Amino acid sequence: MMEKQKIKEGIERYLKVKHGVKLKDAHDYQIFNALSLTVLEDIIDNWNNTTETYNKGRRAYYLSAEFLMGRALGNNLMNLGIYDEVKEVLQELNIDLNKIEEIEEDAGLGNGGLGRLAACFVESAATLNMPLVGYGIRYSNGLFKQNIENGFQTECEDTWLKYGEAWSIRKEDEIQIIEYSDMTVKAVPYDVPIIGYKTKNINTLRLWQCEALREFDFNLFNNQQYIEAVSARNKAEDISRVLYPNDTAEAGKILRLRQQYFFSSASMKDIISKYKANFGNDFSQFAKYNVAQLNDTHPTISILEFIRILVDEEKVSFDNALSIAKEFFGYTNHTILAEALEKWDIRLIERLFPRILQIAYQVDYELMKELRQKGYDEGAIWNFKIIANNVMRMANLAIFVGRAVNGVAELHTEILKKIELNNWYKLYPNKFQNKTNGITPRRWLRLCNSELSKFITDLLGNEDWVKNLELLKGLKKYKDDDEVLKNLMKIKHEKKVQLASYIKQEEGIEIDPDSFFDIQIKRLHEYKRQLLNALYILDLYYRIKENPNLDIPKTTFIFGAKAFPGYKRAKGIVKFINEIARLVDSDEVVSKKIKVVFVHNYRVSYAQKLFPGSDLSKQISTAGKEASGTGNMKFMLNATPTFGTYDGANIEIVKASGEENNYIFGLRVEDIEKIKHSYNPKWYYRENPSIKRVVDALINGTLNDGGCGYFEDLYNALLEERDQYYVLADFELFKKEEEKVFKDYKDKKKWAQKCFANLCNAGIFSSDRTIKQYADEIWDIKPITFKDASI
Ligand SMILES: *Cc1c(COP(=O)(O)O)cnc(C)c1O
């Protein structure tokens, strides 16, 4: 535990040496930096001790192109158990810790669920003392910042490093050299401490930054060719400059391929050189000490790079290298959307790293040999091939070599086994596993909802639940206790007041904290069906106009979502929601009953305010399309019922907390399978006047997209392109279910019980549980603490 005096001295010292100012003249960001460095300084010994200890035993590596970390300061102070001390120290100096926390830029090095999962995983591993190291890319620009202008999404760059980032250490002496056929660059590691909750172990997230070998070409500069002199540097820095903002769709960009190879190669070289330093050159022991998890296919080229290094540089035979790789790598699949399965043009691969292509052919040959031996015919073999039609299919490579292949929720894994990857499942039934996703209870409850946390701690008598979330079950004995239920709803109201005031500050929009907060927050994608929610709200608008006394609670519909900048239809949906918001606001009668708000720049730090201030969690993806979802778990943990389809982890959420405490509606996977060939959205449009009315509003001038064609495109998606996501098929079922919500909400006690049941049963969605399963069932690693950790 840090003493208050030490904290104060640290802040003053770092203000002096880093910023050259005295406390009285310091800006908030300078105080943020000085405070962060003070804490960093204090944990360095523990961090080094942890690393040394992990180096000696079996370790796991989590390879991910994305880590959506959000802010570090508050979480680190809380996990170290010094949040209150620091708050008091700052108070004595007349500084508000909360204001300092809000200064921190989110580390937005990810798009959405996949990147946030990686962030929750490294935090859970640290909390559990699991020897796990994260490897990723230190993008100079994270996910774009979103603005809403006149209802349209606009984007600008996310320069999160502008004040310098306090929470990482550049490791100049652990640089790796990365070679492409047309350039050679440096991969510079920046180590981020991953501080677990109440443990002295400090884990590491190693993010690679790309730099040129030389800052500039002196001779060119001397010849006054200034642009040419720095062009190699710029080209190198481009590699880790930006995170690709496309969620789920494949990006066929050369630079993206360079990025993937860049961090894969750097990580493999790092892992191999550490192995050699600790255990020597005998690679027969390599897989005993090392295991790597591929978070989706983005790092899959690591497999080929690993084999290349062993064969070309370490003189291991190809057969041995492949069999070591088969013990070393595991693969997590995150999606069944066909457009998201990565395929790379082999001409590109050949151009950038020809040797990698040769290795890929060799691996493919081994696969074909095995299949032929097992009696597969050439037609069947084609589907398994790693290289076919001049593309490299990254998932096939990962499944063939992977020691385990896992889906991220029960339904998702079943779909992989029975449908999408059925051929692979039949070949390797034992490789397939399920690992239902999870979220860290530290950030997603203890930090973002201290009020609810205190409520739980008071009832359970201690804070053990923060590390052992299943203990929430112990609350169940209070499920009929009026006082407890009333307190729960009082806290919810308080969090809604806080959210309303934040929305006022950020959006300039007033919302009524006494209204029902119905929230849908997630990346904008057709399969997530924000459009269905919007069409429902538009229908509600018409119904209130027809009947101003319509019996519904006053409701605020809140959306938050970034759309991939090139995804026209998603941007059309953003505009559509904002036009509905405008329509509602402009109507004196309707605006008394409902309100629509689209919050801009949805990100981790905004999410931490939205989940706690919610009454309803909207999870309405087309059944079979959302692999798991983790936003659904964050709502549940903040005592909010789910309104959703039978999809992803929604199914497991409802199984845990009871159908009666949630709202499940809509077509299920089996239903869709049955109707998919005969589905005719125009029938719904003709037969259902409510549907006709809202769909027509897209093209009859009711709503205006400024002539850009967005709304006509949405109209066509629904009627002319056969409504790929079954929006119209689920419309009426959605409407009925929401009516049920409104009716149930009237009974305050019953509603509180539903909220409470969700909280009590959220334990299994802790990422601690998920990490333990990976550790036991795939990685075979065990918790370990360094020798003097208890002192
Ligand atoms: C949790 C989270 C997500 C994932 O949300 P889903 O509803 O599971 O898609 C995306 N973005 C942020 C900022 C998150 O915190």
Image (tube, rainbow, N blue to C red):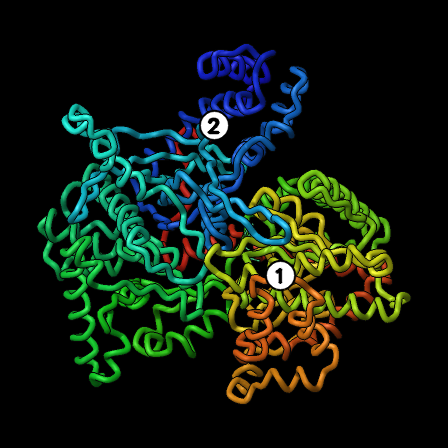
Q: Residue at position x 89%, y 66% from top?
A: 548
**Which residue is situated farthest in the bottom direction here?**
678
Identify the amino acid type marked 2: Tyr
Q: Which mark is residue 705?
A: 1
Identify the amino acid type marked 1: Asp
Q: Is residue 787 above or below residue 544?
A: above
Closest to the observer, 155 or 280: 155
Q: In which of the image's four quarters is ligand 1 placed? A: bottom right
Q: Which residue is mark 2?
A: 163
Determine crowd level at label 1: few under 14, some 14-19, many 20+ residues with C-alpha closer than 10 A.
some
Q: Is residue 153 above or below residue 386?
A: above
The x, y position of residue 96, in whole percent, is 66, 24
- Residue 278 in view (yes/no): no
Question: What is the total number of numbered labels drawn onto the structure image?
Answer: 2
Where disc 1 sits, the SS reads loop
Q: Residue at position x 73%, y 67% from top?
A: 538
